[in-house]
Amino acid sequence: MSLPDKVKIVEVSPRDGLQNEKNFIDTAIKIELVNRLSQAGFANVEAVSFVSPKWVPQMADGAEVMAGIHRRPGTIYSALTPNMRGLEAALAAGVDEVVIFGAASEAFSQKNINCSIEESIARFEPVAHAAKEAGLRLRGSISCALGCPYQGETPIASTVNVARRFLALGCDEIDVADTIGVGTARRVGEVMRAVTEVVDASRVAGHFHDTYGQALANILAAMQVGIQIFHSSVAGLGGCPYAKGATGNVATEDVLYMLHGMGIETGVDLDAVIDIGQWISGHVGKKPASRAGNAMAAKKAA
């Protein structure tokens, strides 16, 4: 299949990128991050998470962040909402899209939320129903869609089953997430082909972590089977707290450099994203994990 002319990038650094940082990032910094990303042209920014602050203290200021941002017309601001309490907080904060999530791995589901895949999805039924009643976009994220730290490779049928269930819940978009970054191009192609047999390709997104350096190849493989939505995190921020050694999401700068170099439109300003990556990395005390970002920043500074 030919490659798409245009790709949508969902920028996840404010939520997925920052949630595991041990030192609390100041609310004002989070607000500025979301604002700078909006100004850089992202059509969708995963801004906050309404989860228990006991479990994810970094996300405790979600309401303040949403209240403080400058909303760019046309940008979708998303929030992770694992339960009805989270959904109510998201509604009060005025988010545009809520995100529910379930694992394609039975072992991952049992170890992390102490219930089966079926039970986990059943828990989302009232959340999904209420979100649609409120007129919000609903996104379903399938974690461990390619591999699991506990059971190894995830059966394709299991990933397809969760996609089918999310579709039945009314999800507008479904993310196929390689949470621990073990996927390779051929397998990604197989999984995406199988998922798009039950969900229209225009509603499927790829969410790839770069643990084994495969994320860009996996994005290319997904595009070749018709996927046109991808998640990334500026400076490669993020990781998976449940998977030892699992590094961050693929760096947005690297994805943009590849896509723009292939003549694929994103609507995002790469130069602005490079500056954001260098800036936020300074605030979290890490070197940016983006190769393209670091090379281009060094070139600018020369």
Image (cartoon, helix red, strand yellow):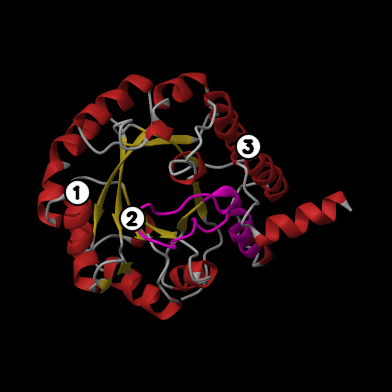
Q: Position of residue 284 (x, y in %)?
A: 59, 40
Tell which circle, 1 or 2, labels the residue nearer the N-terminal end. 1
In reply to whether residue 69 is colored magenta, the answer given is no
Q: Amino acid at mark 1?
A: Ile
Query: Label 2: which residue?
Result: 242
Q: CA distance from mark 1 to mark 2?
A: 11 Å
- Alpha-carbon neighbours of circle 2 within 10 Å: few (<14), some, or many (≥20)? some
- Alpha-carbon neighbours of circle 3 within 10 Å: few (<14), some, or many (≥20)? few
**Quadrant position of residue 97:** top left
Residue drawn 58% across and 34% down?
33
Q: Which residues are magenta?
A: 233-259
Q: Is residue 147 visible?
A: yes
**Quadrant position of residue 88:** top left
Q: Amino acid at mark 2?
A: Tyr
Secondary element under disc 1, as helix, strand or loop, is helix
* Image vertical order of residue 190 relative to residue 297, above or below: below
Query: Label 1: which residue?
Result: 113
**Seen in the image, is 198 located left or right of residue 249?**
left
Residue drawn 21% across and 45% down?
170
Query: Label 3: which residue?
Result: 283
Q: Position of residue 142 (x, y in %)?
A: 29, 56
Secondary element under disc 2, as helix, strand or loop, is loop
- Alpha-carbon neighbours of circle 1 within 10 Å: few (<14), some, or many (≥20)? few
**Which residue reaches farthest right?**
302
* Image vertical order of residue 240 relative to residue 50, above or below: below
Q: Amino acid at mark 3?
A: His
Residue drawn 43% across and 34% down?
58
Secondary element under disc 3, as helix, strand or loop, is helix
